[in-house]
Amino acid sequence: MSEVLANTSKGHIEVRNFSLAYETIEGPVQAVTDTQIHVKPGEFVSIVGPSGCGKSTLLNAVAGFLKPTTGIVTVDGDRVNGPSAERGMVFQQYSLFPWKTVRENVEFGLKMRGMPRSQRERAARTLLGLAGLEAFEKHYPEKLSGGMKQRVGIVRALATGPKVLLLDEPFGALDAQTRVIMQQILTNMWQRLKISVLFVTHDIDEAIFLSDRVYCMTARPGSIKAEIPIPLERPRQQAMMMSSEFLALRRGLMSLIREESLKAMGGEINDMGMQGLNIELHGHSLADVI
Amino acid sequence: MPATAIAEAGPAPAATPPATPASFGTLTLRWYRLNQGRLRATAIGIASLIAFLLVWHLLTTYRVVFFVRFTNVPSPLAVYASFTTAIHDPKFLMHILLSCRRIFIGFSLAAIVGVPLGLIMGRFKLAHEVIFPVAEVLRPIPAIAWVPMAIMLWPTNEQSIVFITFLGSFFPILVNTLHGMSLVDPVLVRAAQCLGARERSIFREVYFPASLPHIFTGLTVGMGVAWVSLIAAEMISGQYGIGYFTWEAYSLVQYADIALGMIAIGVLGLGSSLLIRGMGQLVMPWRST
Ligand SMILES: Nc1ncnc2c1ncn2[C@@H]1O[C@H](COP(=O)(O)OP(=O)(O)O)[C@@H](O)[C@H]1O
Ligand SMILES: [Mg+2]
Protein backbone atom coordinates (compact mmCIF):
# COMPACT_ATOMS: atom_id res chain seq x y z
CA MET A 1 0.00 0.00 0.00
CA SER A 2 2.73 2.45 0.91
CA GLU A 3 4.23 2.09 -2.56
CA VAL A 4 1.01 3.29 -4.07
CA LEU A 5 0.60 6.15 -1.64
CA ALA A 6 4.20 7.20 -1.42
CA ASN A 7 5.22 10.41 -3.08
CA THR A 8 8.63 9.76 -4.50
CA SER A 9 9.48 13.18 -5.86
CA LYS A 10 10.05 16.41 -4.11
CA GLY A 11 7.42 18.89 -5.14
CA HIS A 12 9.44 21.85 -6.29
CA ILE A 13 7.06 24.38 -7.87
CA GLU A 14 8.49 26.91 -10.26
CA VAL A 15 6.52 29.64 -12.03
CA ARG A 16 8.57 31.70 -14.46
CA ASN A 17 7.79 34.79 -16.56
CA PHE A 18 4.17 34.01 -15.96
CA SER A 19 1.30 36.05 -17.28
CA LEU A 20 -2.31 35.18 -17.91
CA ALA A 21 -5.02 37.08 -19.75
CA TYR A 22 -8.67 36.03 -19.91
CA GLU A 23 -10.31 36.39 -23.29
CA THR A 24 -13.53 38.37 -23.02
CA ILE A 25 -15.81 40.17 -25.44
CA GLU A 26 -14.23 43.48 -24.48
CA GLY A 27 -10.83 42.03 -25.24
CA PRO A 28 -8.23 40.33 -23.13
CA VAL A 29 -8.35 40.95 -19.37
CA GLN A 30 -4.85 40.84 -18.00
CA ALA A 31 -5.24 39.04 -14.66
CA VAL A 32 -1.62 38.29 -13.82
CA THR A 33 1.56 39.70 -15.39
CA ASP A 34 5.26 39.14 -15.13
CA THR A 35 5.23 36.82 -12.17
CA GLN A 36 7.92 34.55 -10.80
CA ILE A 37 7.30 32.42 -7.79
CA HIS A 38 8.69 29.20 -6.49
CA VAL A 39 8.03 26.78 -3.67
CA LYS A 40 10.89 24.68 -2.48
CA PRO A 41 10.31 21.07 -1.55
CA GLY A 42 8.54 20.86 1.78
CA GLU A 43 8.09 24.60 2.01
CA PHE A 44 4.89 26.34 3.10
CA VAL A 45 4.34 29.41 0.95
CA SER A 46 1.39 31.79 1.01
CA ILE A 47 0.15 34.29 -1.51
CA VAL A 48 -1.68 37.33 -0.17
CA GLY A 49 -3.14 40.25 -2.05
CA PRO A 50 -6.28 42.32 -2.45
CA SER A 51 -9.28 40.49 -3.81
CA GLY A 52 -9.37 40.32 -7.59
CA CYS A 53 -5.61 40.60 -7.91
CA GLY A 54 -5.21 37.22 -9.58
CA LYS A 55 -4.39 34.86 -6.71
CA SER A 56 -6.84 32.20 -7.81
CA THR A 57 -5.74 32.63 -11.40
CA LEU A 58 -2.16 31.91 -10.46
CA LEU A 59 -3.10 28.93 -8.30
CA ASN A 60 -5.37 27.50 -10.99
CA ALA A 61 -2.51 27.72 -13.45
CA VAL A 62 -0.31 25.76 -11.06
CA ALA A 63 -3.12 23.21 -10.68
CA GLY A 64 -3.27 22.92 -14.46
CA PHE A 65 -6.77 24.29 -14.98
CA LEU A 66 -5.55 27.37 -16.82
CA LYS A 67 -2.83 27.68 -19.44
CA PRO A 68 -0.43 30.56 -18.97
CA THR A 69 -0.56 33.18 -21.72
CA THR A 70 3.18 33.51 -21.41
CA GLY A 71 5.67 31.77 -19.21
CA ILE A 72 5.86 28.33 -17.77
CA VAL A 73 4.80 26.39 -14.69
CA THR A 74 6.85 23.38 -13.67
CA VAL A 75 6.77 20.93 -10.80
CA ASP A 76 10.06 19.13 -10.29
CA GLY A 77 11.10 20.27 -13.73
CA ASP A 78 8.07 18.80 -15.49
CA ARG A 79 5.88 21.26 -17.28
CA VAL A 80 2.31 21.45 -15.97
CA ASN A 81 -0.09 20.59 -18.80
CA GLY A 82 -3.31 19.87 -17.00
CA PRO A 83 -4.72 18.78 -13.67
CA SER A 84 -3.21 15.72 -12.10
CA ALA A 85 -3.27 13.81 -8.84
CA GLU A 86 0.30 14.99 -8.29
CA ARG A 87 -1.09 18.35 -7.32
CA GLY A 88 -3.80 18.13 -4.69
CA MET A 89 -6.17 21.03 -4.40
CA VAL A 90 -8.53 22.35 -1.75
CA PHE A 91 -11.14 24.87 -2.86
CA GLN A 92 -12.83 27.61 -0.92
CA GLN A 93 -16.25 26.33 -1.92
CA TYR A 94 -16.62 23.01 -0.17
CA SER A 95 -16.09 20.69 -3.07
CA LEU A 96 -16.96 17.35 -1.53
CA PHE A 97 -19.07 15.06 -3.68
CA PRO A 98 -22.52 15.24 -2.07
CA TRP A 99 -23.42 11.73 -3.29
CA LYS A 100 -20.46 10.13 -1.59
CA THR A 101 -20.06 9.54 2.10
CA VAL A 102 -17.11 11.11 3.89
CA ARG A 103 -15.12 7.92 3.49
CA GLU A 104 -16.02 7.49 -0.16
CA ASN A 105 -14.89 11.07 -0.77
CA VAL A 106 -11.52 10.33 0.79
CA GLU A 107 -11.28 7.10 -1.18
CA PHE A 108 -11.94 8.80 -4.50
CA GLY A 109 -8.36 9.48 -5.51
CA LEU A 110 -7.30 5.97 -4.58
CA LYS A 111 -10.19 4.53 -6.54
CA MET A 112 -9.07 6.52 -9.58
CA ARG A 113 -5.72 4.84 -9.19
CA GLY A 114 -7.34 1.45 -9.28
CA MET A 115 -6.62 0.52 -5.69
CA PRO A 116 -8.81 -2.42 -4.64
CA ARG A 117 -11.80 -1.59 -2.51
CA SER A 118 -10.81 -3.21 0.75
CA GLN A 119 -7.40 -1.62 0.62
CA ARG A 120 -8.62 1.87 -0.04
CA GLU A 121 -11.31 1.53 2.60
CA ARG A 122 -8.66 0.72 5.13
CA ALA A 123 -6.47 3.61 3.98
CA ALA A 124 -9.38 6.05 4.08
CA ARG A 125 -10.33 4.96 7.59
CA THR A 126 -6.81 5.49 8.84
CA LEU A 127 -6.61 8.92 7.25
CA LEU A 128 -9.95 9.95 8.68
CA GLY A 129 -8.83 8.77 12.10
CA LEU A 130 -5.81 11.00 11.81
CA ALA A 131 -8.03 13.99 11.16
CA GLY A 132 -10.40 13.05 13.98
CA LEU A 133 -13.19 12.26 11.57
CA GLU A 134 -13.57 8.50 12.00
CA ALA A 135 -16.97 8.91 13.61
CA PHE A 136 -18.28 10.61 10.48
CA GLU A 137 -17.06 8.20 7.83
CA LYS A 138 -20.58 7.13 6.88
CA HIS A 139 -22.07 10.62 6.90
CA TYR A 140 -22.93 12.47 3.75
CA PRO A 141 -21.18 15.86 3.45
CA GLU A 142 -24.44 17.77 3.72
CA LYS A 143 -24.65 16.85 7.40
CA LEU A 144 -21.20 18.20 8.28
CA SER A 145 -20.21 21.63 9.54
CA GLY A 146 -18.10 23.86 7.30
CA GLY A 147 -14.93 23.12 9.25
CA MET A 148 -15.47 19.39 9.02
CA LYS A 149 -16.18 19.58 5.31
CA GLN A 150 -12.93 21.39 4.75
CA ARG A 151 -11.04 18.90 6.91
CA VAL A 152 -12.42 16.11 4.76
CA GLY A 153 -11.42 18.14 1.70
CA ILE A 154 -7.84 18.36 2.92
CA VAL A 155 -7.67 14.70 3.82
CA ARG A 156 -9.12 13.79 0.42
CA ALA A 157 -6.52 15.90 -1.36
CA LEU A 158 -3.71 14.31 0.64
CA ALA A 159 -4.90 10.72 0.43
CA THR A 160 -3.14 9.98 -2.83
CA GLY A 161 0.14 11.39 -1.60
CA PRO A 162 0.48 14.37 -3.95
CA LYS A 163 3.77 16.20 -4.35
CA VAL A 164 2.22 19.55 -3.62
CA LEU A 165 -0.92 20.82 -1.96
CA LEU A 166 -2.66 23.89 -3.36
CA LEU A 167 -5.23 25.69 -1.24
CA ASP A 168 -7.39 28.57 -2.45
CA GLU A 169 -8.71 30.50 0.57
CA PRO A 170 -9.78 27.23 2.15
CA PHE A 171 -10.81 28.77 5.47
CA GLY A 172 -12.33 31.95 4.08
CA ALA A 173 -15.89 30.88 4.82
CA LEU A 174 -15.21 29.63 8.36
CA ASP A 175 -15.74 31.46 11.62
CA ALA A 176 -12.69 32.72 13.50
CA GLN A 177 -12.56 29.91 16.08
CA THR A 178 -12.88 27.16 13.53
CA ARG A 179 -10.31 28.82 11.33
CA VAL A 180 -7.70 28.75 14.10
CA ILE A 181 -8.31 25.03 14.65
CA MET A 182 -8.12 24.35 10.93
CA GLN A 183 -4.82 26.22 10.68
CA GLN A 184 -3.43 24.03 13.43
CA ILE A 185 -4.63 20.87 11.71
CA LEU A 186 -3.18 21.93 8.38
CA THR A 187 0.17 22.75 10.02
CA ASN A 188 0.26 19.37 11.72
CA MET A 189 -0.45 17.50 8.51
CA TRP A 190 2.07 19.53 6.56
CA GLN A 191 4.77 18.85 9.13
CA ARG A 192 4.09 15.14 9.17
CA LEU A 193 4.05 14.86 5.41
CA LYS A 194 6.78 17.32 4.53
CA ILE A 195 4.78 18.20 1.47
CA SER A 196 5.10 21.51 -0.42
CA VAL A 197 2.17 23.85 0.15
CA LEU A 198 1.02 26.84 -1.86
CA PHE A 199 -1.64 28.64 0.13
CA VAL A 200 -3.77 31.51 -1.13
CA THR A 201 -5.44 33.79 1.40
CA HIS A 202 -6.40 37.39 1.95
CA ASP A 203 -5.90 37.03 5.70
CA ILE A 204 -2.50 38.44 6.65
CA ASP A 205 -2.39 36.84 10.11
CA GLU A 206 -3.18 33.47 8.62
CA ALA A 207 -0.43 33.85 6.03
CA ILE A 208 2.21 34.79 8.61
CA PHE A 209 1.15 32.17 11.12
CA LEU A 210 1.28 29.32 8.62
CA SER A 211 4.05 30.16 6.19
CA ASP A 212 7.76 29.94 5.70
CA ARG A 213 7.48 32.63 3.09
CA VAL A 214 4.74 35.01 1.93
CA TYR A 215 4.31 36.52 -1.51
CA CYS A 216 2.42 39.77 -1.59
CA MET A 217 0.67 40.55 -4.86
CA THR A 218 -0.16 43.88 -6.44
CA ALA A 219 -3.65 44.89 -7.47
CA ARG A 220 -4.80 43.75 -10.89
CA PRO A 221 -3.04 43.00 -13.10
CA GLY A 222 -1.39 41.04 -10.35
CA SER A 223 2.30 40.54 -10.01
CA ILE A 224 4.57 39.88 -7.08
CA LYS A 225 5.10 43.06 -5.08
CA ALA A 226 7.17 41.58 -2.32
CA GLU A 227 8.45 38.33 -0.96
CA ILE A 228 8.66 38.16 2.81
CA PRO A 229 10.40 35.34 4.66
CA ILE A 230 8.76 34.41 7.97
CA PRO A 231 11.55 33.45 10.35
CA LEU A 232 9.22 32.57 13.25
CA GLU A 233 10.29 29.32 14.85
CA ARG A 234 8.27 26.14 14.65
CA PRO A 235 6.17 24.62 16.02
CA ARG A 236 4.14 27.77 16.09
CA GLN A 237 1.80 28.51 18.95
CA GLN A 238 -1.26 30.71 18.96
CA ALA A 239 0.49 32.90 21.55
CA MET A 240 3.12 33.87 18.99
CA MET A 241 0.57 36.06 17.28
CA MET A 242 1.10 38.53 20.12
CA SER A 243 4.89 38.52 19.85
CA SER A 244 6.68 41.64 18.71
CA GLU A 245 8.27 39.67 15.89
CA PHE A 246 4.87 38.60 14.57
CA LEU A 247 3.45 42.08 14.94
CA ALA A 248 6.38 43.61 13.08
CA LEU A 249 5.85 41.21 10.17
CA ARG A 250 2.19 41.98 10.26
CA ARG A 251 2.79 45.72 10.17
CA GLY A 252 5.11 45.30 7.22
CA LEU A 253 2.66 43.23 5.23
CA MET A 254 -0.23 45.49 6.16
CA SER A 255 1.50 48.57 4.85
CA LEU A 256 2.43 46.76 1.64
CA ILE A 257 -1.17 45.82 1.03
CA ARG A 258 -2.52 49.19 2.03
CA GLU A 259 -0.04 50.83 -0.28
CA GLU A 260 -1.29 48.52 -2.97
CA SER A 261 -4.90 49.45 -2.54
CA LEU A 262 -3.93 53.12 -2.56
CA LYS A 263 -1.50 53.06 -5.43
CA ALA A 264 -3.59 50.55 -7.36
CA MET A 265 -0.44 49.65 -9.22
CA GLY A 266 2.92 48.54 -7.96
CA GLY A 267 4.60 45.63 -9.57
CA GLU A 268 8.19 45.81 -8.53
CA ILE A 269 9.49 42.50 -7.52
CA ASN A 270 11.28 42.37 -4.27
CA ASP A 271 13.37 39.36 -4.97
CA MET A 272 14.99 38.16 -1.81
CA GLY A 273 16.67 35.44 -3.78
CA MET A 274 16.65 31.76 -3.35
CA GLN A 275 18.08 30.61 -0.10
CA GLY A 276 19.87 27.83 -1.90
CA LEU A 277 18.74 25.46 0.74
CA ASN A 278 17.20 22.15 -0.17
CA ILE A 279 15.19 20.70 2.61
CA GLU A 280 15.58 16.95 2.77
CA LEU A 281 12.33 15.39 1.74
CA HIS A 282 11.42 12.05 3.11
CA GLY A 283 8.97 11.49 0.35
CA HIS A 284 6.28 10.14 2.57
CA SER A 285 2.59 10.43 2.13
CA LEU A 286 0.07 10.86 4.87
CA ALA A 287 -0.68 7.17 5.01
CA ASP A 288 2.95 6.28 5.70
CA VAL A 289 3.41 8.70 8.53
CA ILE A 290 0.71 7.20 10.65
CA MET B 1 -52.16 6.00 7.01
CA PRO B 2 -55.87 5.70 7.77
CA ALA B 3 -57.53 7.79 10.41
CA THR B 4 -57.86 4.83 12.74
CA ALA B 5 -54.12 4.89 13.18
CA ILE B 6 -54.56 7.83 15.51
CA ALA B 7 -56.38 5.65 17.96
CA GLU B 8 -54.52 2.42 17.36
CA ALA B 9 -50.93 3.53 17.16
CA GLY B 10 -50.98 5.05 20.62
CA PRO B 11 -50.47 1.91 22.71
CA ALA B 12 -47.84 0.38 20.42
CA PRO B 13 -44.83 2.59 21.24
CA ALA B 14 -45.87 2.72 24.88
CA ALA B 15 -45.82 -1.04 25.12
CA THR B 16 -42.40 -1.65 23.55
CA PRO B 17 -40.00 -0.05 26.04
CA PRO B 18 -41.01 -1.49 29.39
CA ALA B 19 -37.71 -0.39 30.92
CA THR B 20 -38.54 3.31 30.80
CA PRO B 21 -40.29 4.59 33.85
CA ALA B 22 -42.52 6.88 31.75
CA SER B 23 -46.13 5.90 32.03
CA PHE B 24 -48.38 4.72 29.27
CA GLY B 25 -50.20 8.01 29.25
CA THR B 26 -47.06 10.15 29.04
CA LEU B 27 -45.75 8.19 26.08
CA THR B 28 -49.01 8.40 24.22
CA LEU B 29 -49.06 12.10 24.81
CA ARG B 30 -45.45 12.49 23.69
CA TRP B 31 -46.02 10.43 20.54
CA TYR B 32 -49.06 12.55 19.81
CA ARG B 33 -47.09 15.80 20.22
CA LEU B 34 -44.26 14.64 17.97
CA ASN B 35 -46.60 13.57 15.20
CA GLN B 36 -49.19 16.26 15.61
CA GLY B 37 -48.45 17.93 12.27
CA ARG B 38 -48.66 14.74 10.29
CA LEU B 39 -51.76 13.53 12.10
CA ARG B 40 -53.47 16.82 11.38
CA ALA B 41 -52.63 16.59 7.68
CA THR B 42 -53.84 12.99 7.50
CA ALA B 43 -57.06 13.77 9.31
CA ILE B 44 -57.83 16.78 7.12
CA GLY B 45 -56.93 14.80 3.99
CA ILE B 46 -59.32 12.02 4.87
CA ALA B 47 -62.06 14.45 5.80
CA SER B 48 -61.71 16.23 2.48
CA LEU B 49 -61.87 12.97 0.54
CA ILE B 50 -65.02 12.02 2.40
CA ALA B 51 -66.50 15.44 1.66
CA PHE B 52 -65.68 14.95 -2.02
CA LEU B 53 -67.47 11.60 -2.10
CA LEU B 54 -70.41 13.08 -0.25
CA VAL B 55 -70.78 15.98 -2.70
CA TRP B 56 -70.48 13.56 -5.59
CA HIS B 57 -73.14 11.36 -4.02
CA LEU B 58 -75.54 14.28 -3.47
CA LEU B 59 -75.02 15.74 -6.94
CA THR B 60 -75.77 12.44 -8.62
CA THR B 61 -78.65 11.21 -6.44
CA TYR B 62 -80.49 14.52 -6.92
CA ARG B 63 -79.44 14.67 -10.59
CA VAL B 64 -78.45 18.30 -10.31
CA VAL B 65 -78.51 20.36 -13.47
CA PHE B 66 -76.72 23.65 -12.95
CA PHE B 67 -74.71 24.59 -16.05
CA VAL B 68 -73.25 21.05 -15.92
CA ARG B 69 -75.61 18.11 -16.00
CA PHE B 70 -75.28 15.31 -13.49
CA THR B 71 -78.26 13.49 -14.97
CA ASN B 72 -76.25 10.58 -16.37
CA VAL B 73 -73.25 10.73 -14.07
CA PRO B 74 -72.98 7.53 -12.01
CA SER B 75 -73.12 7.81 -8.26
CA PRO B 76 -70.19 6.64 -6.09
CA LEU B 77 -72.18 3.63 -5.00
CA ALA B 78 -72.90 2.63 -8.60
CA VAL B 79 -69.19 2.93 -9.38
CA TYR B 80 -68.37 0.82 -6.36
CA ALA B 81 -70.84 -1.81 -7.51
CA SER B 82 -69.30 -1.96 -10.98
CA PHE B 83 -65.88 -2.13 -9.33
CA THR B 84 -66.83 -5.23 -7.36
CA THR B 85 -68.00 -6.97 -10.52
CA ALA B 86 -65.04 -5.76 -12.60
CA ILE B 87 -62.51 -7.03 -10.12
CA HIS B 88 -63.69 -10.57 -10.82
CA ASP B 89 -63.83 -9.99 -14.56
CA PRO B 90 -60.68 -11.31 -16.26
CA LYS B 91 -61.32 -8.95 -19.16
CA PHE B 92 -61.08 -5.87 -16.94
CA LEU B 93 -57.88 -7.15 -15.39
CA MET B 94 -56.47 -7.79 -18.85
CA HIS B 95 -57.22 -4.19 -19.85
CA ILE B 96 -55.26 -2.98 -16.85
CA LEU B 97 -52.43 -5.41 -17.38
CA LEU B 98 -52.07 -4.46 -21.03
CA SER B 99 -51.96 -0.76 -20.23
CA CYS B 100 -49.31 -1.39 -17.59
CA ARG B 101 -47.30 -3.42 -20.08
CA ARG B 102 -47.45 -0.64 -22.65
CA ILE B 103 -46.38 1.92 -20.06
CA PHE B 104 -43.58 -0.31 -18.90
CA ILE B 105 -42.18 -0.88 -22.39
CA GLY B 106 -42.71 2.65 -23.70
CA PHE B 107 -41.46 4.38 -20.58
CA SER B 108 -38.48 2.07 -20.12
CA LEU B 109 -37.41 2.64 -23.71
CA ALA B 110 -37.76 6.38 -23.23
CA ALA B 111 -35.59 6.23 -20.10
CA ILE B 112 -33.04 3.92 -21.72
CA VAL B 113 -32.69 6.23 -24.73
CA GLY B 114 -33.43 9.62 -23.12
CA VAL B 115 -31.12 9.53 -20.12
CA PRO B 116 -27.92 8.48 -21.92
CA LEU B 117 -28.70 10.81 -24.81
CA GLY B 118 -29.17 13.71 -22.40
CA LEU B 119 -25.93 12.85 -20.63
CA ILE B 120 -24.02 12.67 -23.90
CA MET B 121 -25.56 15.88 -25.22
CA GLY B 122 -24.72 17.60 -21.95
CA ARG B 123 -21.11 16.52 -22.15
CA PHE B 124 -20.26 16.71 -25.85
CA LYS B 125 -20.94 19.93 -27.64
CA LEU B 126 -21.16 18.34 -31.08
CA ALA B 127 -23.85 15.89 -29.97
CA HIS B 128 -25.78 18.80 -28.50
CA GLU B 129 -25.40 20.89 -31.66
CA VAL B 130 -26.58 18.06 -33.89
CA ILE B 131 -29.44 16.64 -31.84
CA PHE B 132 -30.83 19.63 -29.99
CA PRO B 133 -32.42 21.45 -32.97
CA VAL B 134 -34.25 18.31 -34.07
CA ALA B 135 -35.43 17.65 -30.53
CA GLU B 136 -36.64 21.23 -30.18
CA VAL B 137 -38.71 20.97 -33.36
CA LEU B 138 -40.28 17.64 -32.41
CA ARG B 139 -40.80 18.40 -28.73
CA PRO B 140 -43.81 20.73 -28.97
CA ILE B 141 -45.77 18.19 -30.99
CA PRO B 142 -48.12 16.47 -28.52
CA ALA B 143 -47.81 12.71 -28.51
CA ILE B 144 -51.49 12.38 -29.53
CA ALA B 145 -50.76 14.28 -32.73
CA TRP B 146 -48.44 11.41 -33.61
CA VAL B 147 -51.25 8.86 -33.66
CA PRO B 148 -51.91 8.81 -37.43
CA MET B 149 -48.19 8.89 -38.16
CA ALA B 150 -47.55 6.13 -35.64
CA ILE B 151 -50.20 3.94 -37.25
CA MET B 152 -48.47 4.41 -40.61
CA LEU B 153 -45.03 3.82 -39.17
CA TRP B 154 -45.65 0.67 -37.20
CA PRO B 155 -47.03 -2.61 -38.52
CA THR B 156 -49.19 -3.37 -35.48
CA ASN B 157 -51.51 -1.31 -33.34
CA GLU B 158 -49.73 -2.48 -30.24
CA GLN B 159 -46.43 -1.12 -31.47
CA SER B 160 -47.86 2.22 -32.43
CA ILE B 161 -49.45 2.66 -29.00
CA VAL B 162 -46.16 1.82 -27.29
CA PHE B 163 -44.46 4.28 -29.63
CA ILE B 164 -46.87 7.05 -28.60
CA THR B 165 -46.20 6.27 -24.94
CA PHE B 166 -42.49 6.33 -25.62
CA LEU B 167 -42.71 9.72 -27.34
CA GLY B 168 -44.73 11.20 -24.52
CA SER B 169 -42.18 10.37 -21.86
CA PHE B 170 -39.06 10.72 -23.99
CA PHE B 171 -38.87 14.51 -24.21
CA PRO B 172 -39.40 15.34 -20.54
CA ILE B 173 -36.71 12.78 -19.67
CA LEU B 174 -34.28 14.13 -22.25
CA VAL B 175 -34.80 17.77 -21.40
CA ASN B 176 -34.49 17.29 -17.66
CA THR B 177 -31.37 15.16 -17.98
CA LEU B 178 -29.86 17.86 -20.16
CA HIS B 179 -30.85 20.50 -17.63
CA GLY B 180 -29.23 18.49 -14.83
CA MET B 181 -26.03 18.22 -16.84
CA SER B 182 -25.92 21.96 -17.38
CA LEU B 183 -26.13 22.56 -13.62
CA VAL B 184 -23.23 20.32 -12.60
CA ASP B 185 -20.94 22.34 -10.34
CA PRO B 186 -17.66 22.87 -12.23
CA VAL B 187 -15.76 22.90 -8.94
CA LEU B 188 -16.71 19.25 -8.44
CA VAL B 189 -15.37 18.41 -11.87
CA ARG B 190 -12.13 20.20 -11.03
CA ALA B 191 -11.91 18.42 -7.70
CA ALA B 192 -12.25 15.10 -9.49
CA GLN B 193 -9.59 16.04 -12.04
CA CYS B 194 -7.19 16.97 -9.23
CA LEU B 195 -7.73 13.52 -7.78
CA GLY B 196 -6.68 11.85 -10.99
CA ALA B 197 -10.08 11.25 -12.61
CA ARG B 198 -10.12 10.96 -16.39
CA GLU B 199 -12.99 11.74 -18.75
CA ARG B 200 -14.74 8.40 -18.29
CA SER B 201 -14.54 8.45 -14.50
CA ILE B 202 -15.63 12.08 -14.34
CA PHE B 203 -18.67 11.16 -16.37
CA ARG B 204 -19.55 8.22 -14.16
CA GLU B 205 -18.53 9.65 -10.78
CA VAL B 206 -19.46 13.31 -11.16
CA TYR B 207 -21.73 14.20 -14.07
CA PHE B 208 -24.07 11.25 -13.70
CA PRO B 209 -24.69 11.36 -9.94
CA ALA B 210 -24.84 15.16 -10.00
CA SER B 211 -27.58 14.99 -12.64
CA LEU B 212 -29.57 12.24 -10.92
CA PRO B 213 -31.98 14.55 -9.09
CA HIS B 214 -32.96 16.17 -12.38
CA ILE B 215 -33.05 12.82 -14.16
CA PHE B 216 -35.60 11.68 -11.61
CA THR B 217 -37.61 14.86 -12.06
CA GLY B 218 -37.64 13.98 -15.76
CA LEU B 219 -38.69 10.41 -15.05
CA THR B 220 -41.54 11.57 -12.81
CA VAL B 221 -42.81 14.09 -15.36
CA GLY B 222 -42.22 11.57 -18.16
CA MET B 223 -44.28 8.95 -16.36
CA GLY B 224 -47.18 11.38 -16.08
CA VAL B 225 -47.03 12.27 -19.77
CA ALA B 226 -46.67 8.58 -20.64
CA TRP B 227 -50.06 7.87 -19.08
CA VAL B 228 -51.66 10.87 -20.78
CA SER B 229 -50.34 9.73 -24.14
CA LEU B 230 -51.20 6.09 -23.58
CA ILE B 231 -54.81 6.77 -22.64
CA ALA B 232 -55.28 9.04 -25.63
CA ALA B 233 -53.73 6.49 -27.97
CA GLU B 234 -55.84 3.67 -26.53
CA MET B 235 -59.03 5.68 -26.89
CA ILE B 236 -58.27 6.39 -30.52
CA SER B 237 -56.76 3.21 -31.82
CA GLY B 238 -56.83 0.57 -29.15
CA GLN B 239 -58.67 -2.66 -28.77
CA TYR B 240 -57.55 -3.26 -25.24
CA GLY B 241 -56.27 -1.20 -22.39
CA ILE B 242 -57.81 0.87 -19.64
CA GLY B 243 -58.19 3.87 -21.95
CA TYR B 244 -60.07 1.74 -24.43
CA PHE B 245 -62.16 0.30 -21.58
CA THR B 246 -63.19 3.81 -20.53
CA TRP B 247 -64.08 4.86 -24.07
CA GLU B 248 -65.91 1.63 -24.76
CA ALA B 249 -67.96 2.10 -21.59
CA TYR B 250 -69.15 5.40 -23.00
CA SER B 251 -70.10 3.83 -26.35
CA LEU B 252 -71.90 1.01 -24.58
CA VAL B 253 -73.71 3.46 -22.27
CA GLN B 254 -72.24 1.82 -19.18
CA TYR B 255 -71.81 5.04 -17.29
CA ALA B 256 -70.52 3.54 -14.06
CA ASP B 257 -67.65 1.94 -15.98
CA ILE B 258 -66.57 5.34 -17.30
CA ALA B 259 -65.89 6.56 -13.78
CA LEU B 260 -64.36 3.21 -12.86
CA GLY B 261 -61.95 3.50 -15.79
CA MET B 262 -61.08 7.05 -14.82
CA ILE B 263 -60.38 6.11 -11.23
CA ALA B 264 -58.32 3.11 -12.32
CA ILE B 265 -56.23 5.39 -14.54
CA GLY B 266 -55.74 7.80 -11.64
CA VAL B 267 -54.70 5.04 -9.27
CA LEU B 268 -52.30 3.51 -11.80
CA GLY B 269 -50.75 6.91 -12.51
CA LEU B 270 -50.33 7.59 -8.82
CA GLY B 271 -48.86 4.14 -8.20
CA SER B 272 -46.34 4.43 -10.99
CA SER B 273 -45.17 7.87 -9.89
CA LEU B 274 -44.78 6.60 -6.32
CA LEU B 275 -42.71 3.76 -7.75
CA ILE B 276 -40.41 6.27 -9.46
CA ARG B 277 -40.11 8.29 -6.30
CA GLY B 278 -39.24 5.18 -4.30
CA MET B 279 -36.60 4.28 -6.85
CA GLY B 280 -35.21 7.79 -6.60
CA GLN B 281 -34.83 7.50 -2.85
CA LEU B 282 -33.15 4.15 -3.28
CA VAL B 283 -30.70 5.45 -5.87
CA MET B 284 -30.00 8.76 -4.11
CA PRO B 285 -29.61 7.90 -0.44
CA TRP B 286 -27.74 11.16 0.16
CA ARG B 287 -30.86 13.17 -0.54
CA SER B 288 -33.22 11.49 1.90
CA THR B 289 -32.94 12.98 5.33
N1 LIG C 1 -13.09 33.74 -16.44
C1 LIG C 1 -12.73 35.04 -16.35
N2 LIG C 1 -12.95 35.89 -17.37
C2 LIG C 1 -12.59 37.19 -17.27
N3 LIG C 1 -12.00 37.72 -16.23
C3 LIG C 1 -11.76 36.94 -15.16
C4 LIG C 1 -12.11 35.56 -15.17
N4 LIG C 1 -11.75 35.02 -13.99
C5 LIG C 1 -11.20 36.02 -13.28
N5 LIG C 1 -11.20 37.18 -13.97
C6 LIG C 1 -10.64 38.46 -13.53
O1 LIG C 1 -9.29 38.28 -13.25
C7 LIG C 1 -8.94 38.94 -12.05
C8 LIG C 1 -8.28 37.99 -11.10
O2 LIG C 1 -9.23 37.06 -10.63
P1 LIG C 1 -8.90 36.02 -9.48
O3 LIG C 1 -7.70 35.27 -9.87
O4 LIG C 1 -10.11 35.23 -9.21
O5 LIG C 1 -8.59 36.98 -8.25
P2 LIG C 1 -8.44 36.64 -6.70
O6 LIG C 1 -8.47 35.17 -6.53
O7 LIG C 1 -7.14 37.25 -6.29
O8 LIG C 1 -9.57 37.32 -6.00
C9 LIG C 1 -10.21 39.52 -11.47
O9 LIG C 1 -10.18 40.92 -11.67
C10 LIG C 1 -11.31 38.90 -12.25
O10 LIG C 1 -12.32 39.83 -12.50
MG1 LIG D 1 -9.89 33.95 -5.47
Image (cartoon, grey):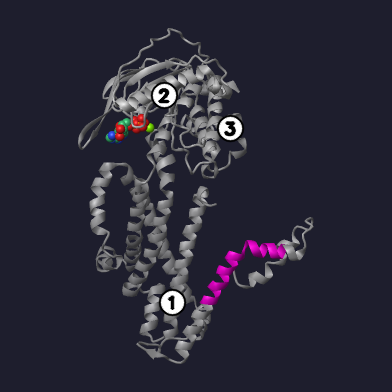
- What chain does badge 2 belong to? A
Callout 2 crowding tier (Cα within 10 Å): few <14, some 14–19, many ≥20: some
Mark carried by residue B96: none
Give the mark nearest the N terminus, 3 or 2.
3
Mark 3 to mark 2 CA distance (whole Å):
37 Å
- What chain does badge 3 belong to? A
Q: Amino acid at mark 1?
A: Gly
- Any atom of ligand 1 within 8 Å of the CB at mark 1? no
Q: Residue at x 60, y 71 (%)?
A: B2
Picture coordinates of residue A207, whole percent (x, y)? 46, 24
From which residue to which does the magenta span run?
B27-48
Q: Within the displayed image, which quadrant is ligand 1 positioned in?
A: top left
Q: Amino acid at mark 3?
A: Leu
Q: Amino acid at mark 2?
A: Met
Which residue occupies the foreground of this view, B190 or B272? B190
Q: Secondary structure at mark 2?
A: helix
Instruction: Tell me where residue B39 sits by quadrant.
Output: bottom right
Per the image, is A110 magenta?
Answer: no
Picture coordinates of residue B245, whole percent (x, y)? 40, 77
Mark 1 to mark 3 CA distance (whole Å):
58 Å
Mark carried by residue A128: 3
Instruction: Tell me where residue B207 sits by quadrant.
Output: top left
Q: Residue at x 59, y 32 (%)?
A: A125
Residue position for label 2: A254
Mark 2 to mark 1 CA distance (whole Å):
78 Å
Mark carried by residue B261: 1
- What chain does badge 1 belong to? B
User: Is A240 on the left-hand or right-hand side of A272?
Assistant: right
Q: Residue at x 38, y 44 (%)?
A: B184
